[in-house]
Amino acid sequence: MGNWFKSGAPWIWMTAGAVSLSLAAVLGLLLLIGWKGLSYFWPAPVYQFELDISGNKQTVIGELYEKKSISVKQLAEAGVDVSQIDGDRVERYLIKTGNRERVELDFITVLETQVESRTLADGIAVIDRVKNGKFYGYPISFIDDGVSKSMTDLPDGLSAADKVRDEIRQLQQTDIAEINRQLELLRLEERKQGQQPELELRREKLEQDYSALEQRLFALRQKLEQDAVLVRDMAGVMVRLPLGQVLDLWYPNNLNFIEKLAHWGHQVGKFVSEDPREANTEGGVFPAIFGTVFMVLLMSVVVTPLGVMAAVYLHEYAGKNRFTNLIRVAVINLAGVPSIVYGVFGLGFFVYMVGGSVDEIFFSDQLPAPTFGTPGILWSALTLAILTLPVVIVSTEEGLARIPNSVRHGSLALGATQAETLWRIVLPMASPAIMTGLILAVARAAGEVAPLMLVGVVKMAPTLPVDGQFPYLHLDRKFMHLGYHIYDVGFQSPNVEAARPLVYATSFLLVTVIVGLNLTAIGIRNHLREKYRSLEY
C-alpha cells in the first residue's frame, strides 16, 4: 500500500474522479435546464376534472401541471378541512386552466379527495392568443365575413390573419415609422429656421400620408375583428374569439407522437423567432437573442484591439521595472472588481459624461431630449469591454511570453524592423492566445446582467438596434438581453407558475448562445494555430 501511495497513482485517481464529478455536475445541470425548458413546448394532455369542493360541484378543464404529495398535518395547520382524508398524506394537483379573462387565476389547486373523476377531454382545443394567455375550449364554428363555416376552414383563416398581421406590422414599423422620422426631422428644421411656407407644405404632405396609412391600419384591424372562432368554454358558455387575437389552435389529445413532435418543433421555432408578449410571459425571445449577440459582437470589436495593444506594449516595449509590474498587478486586480461597479462607472463616464458631451456638440437641436446621453447598447458594449479587458490583456501577454526570443532575434537579424517583426511574426504566432482571451471575454460578457441594468438593457425594447431606417445601425437605442429577460420573468412576473418554464427555456437558450459563440471562436483559434504552427520551427 505504501509503495502504491508513493507511486502517485492515488493522485491520478483523485484528479480523474474530480474531473469526472465536475463533468457529471455540468452535464447534469445542462440536462436539467434543457429538460425543464424544452418540455414546456410539448403539447400536454388536457383533462376534464369533476370536482366536489365542500359540496360545491364544478367542472374544470385544464392541464395537470404538477402533482405533489402533501402531509395531512400540514394541511390541517393551514386551516384546510381534512376530516374526509384517510391516511397521513394526500396528493395535491396543480391544474392550469387558462382562460385568463374568464377566471381569476391561471392555476387552481385541488386535493385528490376533491376530484370525483378525471378524464381526457374529448375534442378539446388549446388556442394560443395575442393576449390573456391560452384558451381551453371546444371549437364550434369559424366565422368568416359573417358566414359560419366548418372548423376545417380555420387553417386558411389563420393564414390570412397572419398575412394581415404582417401587413399591419409592416405599416407600423416601416411606413408609419418613416413618416414619424421625417416629421421629427421637419420639427428640428422648424426650430432652426422658424415657420417657412416650404416647411408647412412638407408638413401637410406628411400628415396627409400619415392619415392615409392610419386609415389603412384601422381597416386591417377591423378586418381581423370581423372574423372569429366560436368556442364553448368549460362552463358551457359560448365565447367569441376574434381571429385577430388567435395565433394558433391545436387538439392536444388527438395528436399522435409524430404530430406532437412536429408541434413541439413549431413551438420552439416560434419561441426563438417571435417577439415577447404578455409582460414577457408569452411569445418568443428573438429581440433578446439579437440584443445579446449584437452586444457581445460589438464588445468583441472594441475589447480585442485595446487588449492586444495594451499587452503588446507591456511585453514588447515597456521596460521591466517596478512601474510596469505595478500596471500588471492593477490589470489583474481589475478582474476582481464587482461587475456592478463597472455599471456605475459606465453610467457616470460613458452615459453622462461622454454621451452628454456628444449631445451638446452634435445633437444640441434635440436637447433636452437626449440622444446618446442616455443608456444604450453602445455604452453597454463599452462597459463590458472595460470589464473584460483584463482577461484579454493577461491572455495575450501570456501568449507573447511563450514565443521564443530567438524568433524575434532571427527576424531582426534578417533585416526586419521591430514593427515588422511584431506584425508578421509575433502577433500571428500569438493569435491563438488572443482568441483564447476573446473566448473568455465572450463567456463572461454574455452572462453579465448587473452592469447592463444601468447602461442600456430594458424589459421591452420597441425596436431593434439594427433596422431598415437610416442610418440602419442605431447604437443609441436600448436593447433586450437574455440574462435580464431571465431575471425579469423569474422575479418580476405577476404569474410565477406560468413563467417558471420560460426561465428554464431562456436559460437553456442563453447557454446555447454562449456555447455557439465560444465554439465559433474556438474554431477560429484552432485554424490560426494550425496555420501558424510552422513559424514555431
Image (spheres, rainbow, N blue to C red):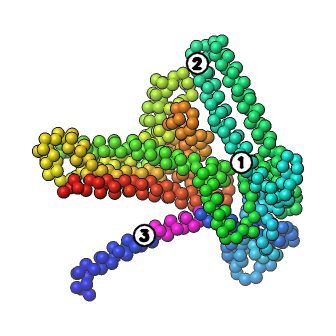
Residue 162, labelled with which disc?
1
Does 505 sit above or below residue 176?
A: below
The residues tagged by marks 3 and 1 sit, at their Cα atoms, a distance apart of: 45 Å
Q: Residue at x 47, y 68 (%)?
A: 27
Secondary structure under tag 3 reads helix
Are the residues at dot 2 and dot 3 in contact (C-beta closer than 8 Å)? no
- Residue 3 spot, x, y in % from top left: 22, 85
Which of 463/113 is in front? Answer: 463
- Residue 238 spot, x, y in % from top left: 87, 57
Q: Quadrant of residue 109?
A: bottom right
Does 23 sit above or below residue 359?
A: below
Image-based side of 347 in relation to 14, left or right: right
Tell whether position 27 is magenta: yes
- Residue 516 spot, x, y in % from top left: 46, 56
Please report whichever mark, 2 or 3, sits nearer to the chain's N-terminal start. 3
* Residue type pointed to by label 3: Leu
Q: Which residue is mark 2?
A: 189
Secondary structure under tag 2 reads helix
* Residue type pointed to by label 1: Asp
Residue range corresponding to the magenta coloring: 25-37
Q: Residue at x 78, y 44 (%)?
A: 224
The residues tagged by marks 2 and 3 sit, at their Cα atoms, a distance apart of: 62 Å
